[in-house]
Amino acid sequence: MLWGLTRVGVAGVPAGSWFGGRWDEPGPGADRSEQECREVEAQIADELARFARPRFLGGGLVSPPPYVRRHAVEHAAAGGALDDRFLSAEFLPFVDARRLRGLQATADSSASGTRETRGARLLHVWRQAAHGWGWESPQLNANTLAFWSMCAGLPPVGSSIPLFWEPRWTRWALGGGEILGRHSGPVRSVAAGVLPDGRAVAVTAGEDRAVRLWDLTSGQAVGSIPVDHTGPVISMATGTLPDGRGVVVTAAEDRAARLWDLATGRAVGGPLAGHTGKVGAVGVGRLPGGRPVALTGSWDETVRIWDLATGRAIGAPLVGHTGRVVAIATVSLPDGRCIAVTTGFDRTVRLWDLATSRPMGRPLTGHTNAVRGLAAGVLPDGGVVAVSASDDGTVRIWDLRAGRGIGVLGDDGYKPKAPVAMAVLPDGRNIVVTAAAGSRVRLWDLATMDAIGEPLAGHTGTVRALAARTLPDGRFVTVSVSDDHTMRVWDLADDAGTNSEAGSDPVSVAALATAVLRDGHSAVVVAGRADATMRVLDLADGQQIGALQGHTEAVIAVATTTLGHGRVMAVSAGQDNTVRLWDLALQRAINETDQLGIWVSVLDGWGLESHWAIRDPLVEGVRHMRSIVAAKLSSGSSVAVVGGLDTAMLCNLTTGQVSALPFSGAQQCAVATRHDGTVLLAFGGFGSGALDLELQVRTGRGRPVHRHSREGGWVHTVAAGALPDGRCVGVAAGEDDFHLRVWDLATGGAIGDPLTGHTGKVRAIAAGALPDGRTVAVSTADDGTVRMWDLVTHQQVGPHLLLPGVARAVALARSEDGGLLVVVGGDGLAVVSVHMEGE
């Protein structure tokens, strides 16, 4: 049936119509008007819309036909009919992301009522999440769309696809711009270039030592470059060879720069070697006559010029700097001369005539600390300027013809800082793009030196590099890369104004733990990444029901347990080198003997009553604590184990006794309960192992059941649980390991193969049981995903969940109906229900 429709649609498309992702120009004699073409495209979209919804057939869900998934949005956009029929939770999980992302179309404005608004908002959310879309994974896409939509404040989205991860509530800011993609580590450098087919691309490099290419129009990864530097690439610049090939020059602090073909990813010639110090900056320019050159700046305080075509050095090194050279920019003067602008740790900005390799004028001074960011350009009036950003907290503008400073960018609370870039808005305004306080991007009007709109928020880590580019469709974009492992693309026309949606600060979580309070309500105790106060939230709706105040510095870890008579307690470790015990019913801290003492009640910023005790902590003076875990032993005693770099401590919460455990270096700890009710401690640090906690508490002379080294270096995170057959297992991930490994806590033997799937460092693990009795682990990683694993079959359970950021903490709880709840916290905070029918 669809094939018949497709033949009719193709036959009815006039010349000059959008079809199959391309624009067919009118042939000779074509006289159809643009309006007629739009009408025909709209008719085709109307017909295709009949097939846009998935269907149930034979007990299973049947996807829309491939042609509809790929081309329906193209026809709809060309016909002005991109409406809720296509911008819905029913169809978007099946759409070809490359085609929809490449369309610069918005929701049809002819629709009336709330449908138009919902479609437009859903399209915006989809664009944010589209970097994680998979053609073969509609179920994964549906789960992602539901979660991200709730983060954006949209009503719950309906979908024919059963959700495996159903969001209950979220406090996770999506931010502005669009996420272009992710590296598996912090991203250090970015450059923009053009492929031979005219596509504008961003080239990004991260601490994962990967260099990747991204199509700036479609958002798709289009290649990678297998660089052979001995460290992460920290500086890049793009250029064009005389034969028209696009190239990128890379530097990685290994005393040489390298040249790569953008289209093939292959090396062009040998290393550009000659510096006696690490190469920290590269640039690309042209000599008179058009000969392309590369420039390299080094810790040896020199700058070298290289012929891009031959790879040979041109002339002697440029000498003058008295500190490391860490930034280079080039600009062509109206008279045809190309000059280089260099800067670095000597706090100066220097100009060089590339034709003569000689300095131009005196060094530009004014900065009082190292200068790390640099950009240069020509203004519409012919003026030539450079912009420099320094560790002194200023960004200065320089008139390169006059050789003097002409301004300093203002400070309105978001002080500009490196990196910097220059761009032009569609209205002709020249702007400067800088990083800003926190993790934001800031736009500045070069003529007035004033900020444009609000800071652009979205990154959750420090912005490390910026690049500006004009796309083939005429849009002006900036690409930013960050320590949060992501690259974001900002449309300067859309984002130059107030960006209120992106300006909201996300919740930042360092640790969390769940508990069931005495009134039957489930709660989560949340510790902020830079907050000495812990918040107690209702697990059902995320509303704050209390606060725990007493630590004087940020809380590192938190756990929950029960004492006698069912008293629900939290135990926390802080950077103030103390361990504190809290009564969650009274919302106050207690000491080990629970004597009353002095305590105070105040109203916090939410108007909620917060309590804390003025008394000695449970433990103090312990440095380098990393984790804390609590458990109730078969004897009825409640204990907490504090893991740290130097020592591991056992705190008997019932008696108040504190003792050192018989091993050191156990930074991460977890507990598992045997079928007989006894408790084993799993620990990880430089290696991993297990300890019989019952024996340790009873005799004080417990010994590790076993201890052995692990692959992947230091064990970064660990969890423990009991399998259906009674075995207790540990689940761990190494400091540099993307995998999870399972071992038997009783024997120390590895069980099965590693659990593979994450593409970034594993950050947190929790273990528990599904309602059907399966023992599972839930893990989070720097790839922004949450994954569930069956610890018996070692297979992933259900699709993974793509988050808007990274989760560094995870905990499990039970819902009212006995289902499994997963709480994740890091760059945001969220609770999701696990539904096995979505598996």
Image (spheres, rainbow, N blue to C red):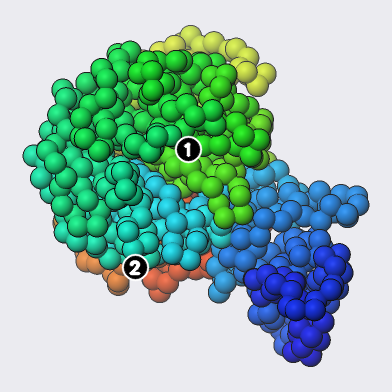
* Residue 690 visible in this rendered orientation of the protein: no
User: Would you call the spot at circle 2 few (<14 residues within 10 Å), some (14-19), or many (20 or more)?
Assistant: some
Q: Earlier in the sequence, mark 1 or mark 2?
A: 2
Pointer 1 local density, CA inside 10 Å: few below 14, some 14–19, many at least 20: many
Q: Residue 825, relative to residue 375: is it above or below?
A: below
Query: Label 2, on which residue?
Result: 264
Q: Nearer the viewer, residue 440 or 785?
A: 440
* Secondary structure found at label 2: loop
Q: Residue at x 54, y 10 (%)?
A: 600
Element assignment for label 1: loop
| Percent of width and height locating residue 124 | 68, 50
| Residue 757 shows in the view | yes
Residue at the (50%, 46%) spot, across then down = 469
Say which residue appears at 30% left-offset and 15% top-offset.
Answer: 365
Q: Label 2 near label 1: C-beta < 8 Å?
A: no
* Above or below: residue 602 compared with residue 711: above
Which residue is at a point 51% across and 16% down the rendered structure image? Answer: 410
- Which of the labelled discs sits on residue 460, or is there none? 1
- Quadrant location, the N terminus: bottom right
